[in-house]
Amino acid sequence: MRIAGHEFGSRLILGTGGFPRLETLADAIRASQTEMVTVAMRRIDPGARGSLVDVLDDCGVRLLPNTAGCYTARDAVLTAKLARDAFETDWVKLEVIGDERTLLPDAVELVLAAERLVDDGFIVLPYTTDDPVLARRLEDVGCAAIMPLGSPIGSGMGINNAYNLRLIREQTALPVILDAGVGTASDAALAMELGCDAVLCASAISRAEDPVGMARAIRLAIEAGLLARGAGRIPQRLHATASTPLAGTPDFVHPSDPARPVPEP
Amino acid sequence: MIVVNGEPSAVAPGATLAELLVALDAPDRGVAIAVDAEVVPRGEWSSHRLADGAHVEVLVAVQGG
């Protein structure tokens, strides 16, 4: 998979939010074989110890800073610029939220922020709704990928509108990365079968009972989904199509059956 | 008075951002600073002096997303 000219061997981007311990995060990164993980920026906590950046460095992954918690283009742009200074990367996972309860993106502010950041030289990966028209707007302003949600962040509801994802896939040559909604491995497999290039996943892994086990499961599901897409699935039908030939089916005559004629030799 | 991350700071006006970071025991990496909602690049931390009334946000990398 190629994003903004950078080749990735892994099609899983891991969100680092929600892991109870840094050690678990590191183990999950290794099990997922991801090459890029998200990080956020928050006010310094004088009591906090243990360096997230050092742990991620040891894992050898690229950092993808996000703008989580921003509700306006203005704040998202400032947060992206701060992240660029902190991590020396032009890449940003752009989130501009419009509603506290659903954490759904604010389409108007999102496009505005994306445009400003692209103009400022950022590689913008926008977290967006599954609206194909909004996806086109984001592509028009120069985003490097489209990252539609399957369902709200952390909801684990999977892919609510497979039809829209297919429309987005069909209309763009940009990488399409399912971002948000994955609850378990089968959701990630479905995303790949529908044509996504990659899956971004945080809570499904970090809040699973066994985060490391789920990291491996989702990695394998992404691989399985991609292979299945390449292999070409059969069409769905209302009625059965026998897989065993009818020709040669035996005709058992039980002793209690009425006599039946036998063909002449 | 300087306001740092929403709280009054013990650091006096005229201090540099580098001095503020020492006072906060900030890590070496993954840190960014905004003064009055403008990024102050890392290269200017030792020269940037805080004016009275400045609103400073000192941010670090945290798990998220």
Image (spheres, coloured by chain):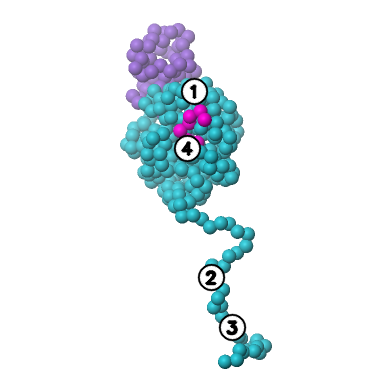
Q: Earlier in the sequence, mark 3 or mark 1?
A: 1
| Amino acid at pointer 3 | Phe
Residue A260 percent coordinates (x, y): 65, 88
**Residue A68 in sight from this viewpoint:** no
Disc 1: which residue = A116
Give whichever of A262, A90 is nearer the camera: A262
The part of the image, by quadrant, that contains residue A106 is top right
| Residue drawn at x 33%, y 34% as measured from the top left | A57
The type of residue carrying mark 2 is: Thr
Q: Which residue is mark 3?
A: A252
Task: First in sequence, mark 3 or 4: give its number.
Answer: 4
- Letter of the cyan chain: A
Quarter occupied by residue A181? top right
- Give SS at disc 2: loop
- Establish whether labels 3 and 4 are both on one chain: yes
Label 1 and label 4 in one chain = yes
Q: Disc 4 to disc 2, how far (Cα)?
A: 43 Å
Marks 3 & 1 on one chain:
yes
The circle drawn on residue A174 is: 4
The residue that mark 2 highlights is: A244
Quarter of the image where the C terminus of chain A is located: bottom right
Name the main secondary structure of what is drawn in magenta: loop
